Amino acid sequence: MTAATKICEYQPGLEGIPATKSSISYVDGTKGIIEYRGIPLEQLAKKSSFLETAYLLIWGQLPNETQLEEFATEVRFHRRIKYRIRDMMKCFPETGHPMDALQTSAAALGLFYSRRALDDPEYIRKAVVRLIAKIPTMVAAFHQMHLGHDPIQPHDSLDYAANFLYMLTEKRPHALEAKIFDVCLTLHAEHTINTSTFSAMVTASTLTDPYAVVASAVGTLAGPLHGGANEEVLSMLEEIGLIDNVLPYVEECIAHKKKIMGFGHRVYKVKDPRAKILQELAQQLLNEKGCDKYYDLALELEKVVEDKLGVKGIYPNVDFYSGLVYRKLGIPRKLFTPIFAIARVAGWLAHWKEQLAVNRIFRPTQVYTGEHNAPYIPMAER
Ligand code: SDX
């Protein structure tokens, strides 16, 4: 037994075990605080943009005007994807989930940009730009293919958020819609050592390429206990259907130990501060575009869950209100989790860089519970 196994007790899900030292973000789950590089997320949501926030996360400080302009211009320049990637995506089954399409296409970037020069700052910078620029284009392209259409090319006159919405409809979005979508990206950009970020760090620790790092994180984000919950929230609200069904639905979930989607968090024992901002954004859109019965259902569900499970620290998490915002922006449900990935790529890349700077391969141990010296039973005797 090593020293580490002697002093550490096994914790299912590694709860409470530090996996790294990091200066990228900070979360206080009892006070409901999130900071990116020390700046409260509420400030960034109000005053920053997604690209500026991504720069802050990845390069460690807010860019000056020239740095931001250069970064935005370079990202704009790299938005297009190679024809061969588009052709490869055309071979995917249109009925497949966009997260699976994204994981495959993100990994495929490694085939086209295969030089692995992790000690070359220029290689790192280019990989960051390419991934931030191309992931939205790949998400939108697969969406168009799923509809049986050709992908819509990025629009050079539109900024990051507006361009993504444009690639879904070929219409320029309203300024308020683009702004709200940009804030959603900022809110999802980073969140300490969440599961997909941990997956990115583990993959990064082998010194593989950044496209493999992002692809592994996309696969991890897709699950319904993590980023996939935002889709499930809308399906759940549809299943509930009427305000009168909310209480029986929650009671049924509690009786059968079924998880209520969009609620609960490993770190937060209060309402996720991002859920508060997303709720305000949903309200802003409702004021602009008219009411939505699912929003009323969500409010009632939050009230009932708080009443029944608040003592356990079960409150809405980031995935609870995001789908309602995207729905009001006219975004199809299957894109909710890919949108989470578009934003979170900033956090994954920040942790990739941080991991490379102090790398030691992740290789935890285990508590073995199997047999020893077991006999090999011949086939005929089994
Ligand atoms: C994200 O980690 C991050 O930072 C993630 C994230 C990010 O930005 O990257 O914030 C994004 O992944 C948000 C989470 C999205 N997932 C969901 O909404 C799915 C529903 N929520 C859960 O399954 C759950 O709350 C987790 C997965 C989010 C957290 O799981 P834990 O920490 O392992 O907690 P647990 O499942 O062991 O539950 C602890 C207790 C249990 O009760 P007891 O058995 O102790 O009596 O809380 C209860 C659970 O039954 N519980 C819930 C519940 N979540 C926890 N009960 C009902 N509904 C829920 N949603």
Image (cartoon, grey):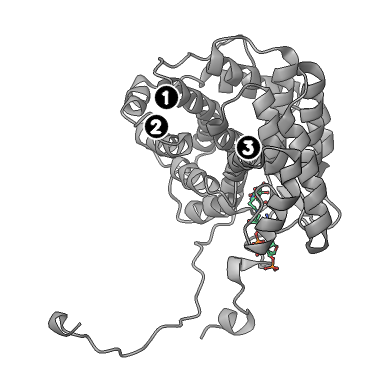
Q: Are marks 1 and 2 in contact (CB under 8 Å)?
A: yes
Residue 273's tag is none
**Label 1 crowding class (10 Å Cα cut-off): few <14, some 14-19, many 20+?**
some
Looking at the picture, how far across and down is residue 93, in whole percent? Answer: 34, 31
Residue under label 1, please give it. 146
Residues 98 and 45: in front is: 98
Looking at the picture, how far across and down is residue 360, in whole percent? Answer: 53, 61
The amino acid type of the residue labelled 2 equals Thr
Q: Is residue 52 left or right of residue 379?
A: right
Residues 224 and 304: in front is: 304
Residue 238's tag is 3
Q: Are marks 3 and 1 in contact (CB under 8 Å)?
A: no
Q: CA distance from mark 3 to mark 1?
A: 23 Å
Residues 320 and 67: in front is: 320
Say whether disc 3 or disc 1 marks the residue closer to the N-terminus.
Answer: 1
Which residue appears at 50% of the width and 74% of the height? Answer: 365
Which residue appears at 59% of the width and 52% of the height? Answer: 225
Q: CA distance from mark 3 to mark 2?
A: 22 Å
Residue lying farthest to the right in this orientation:
31
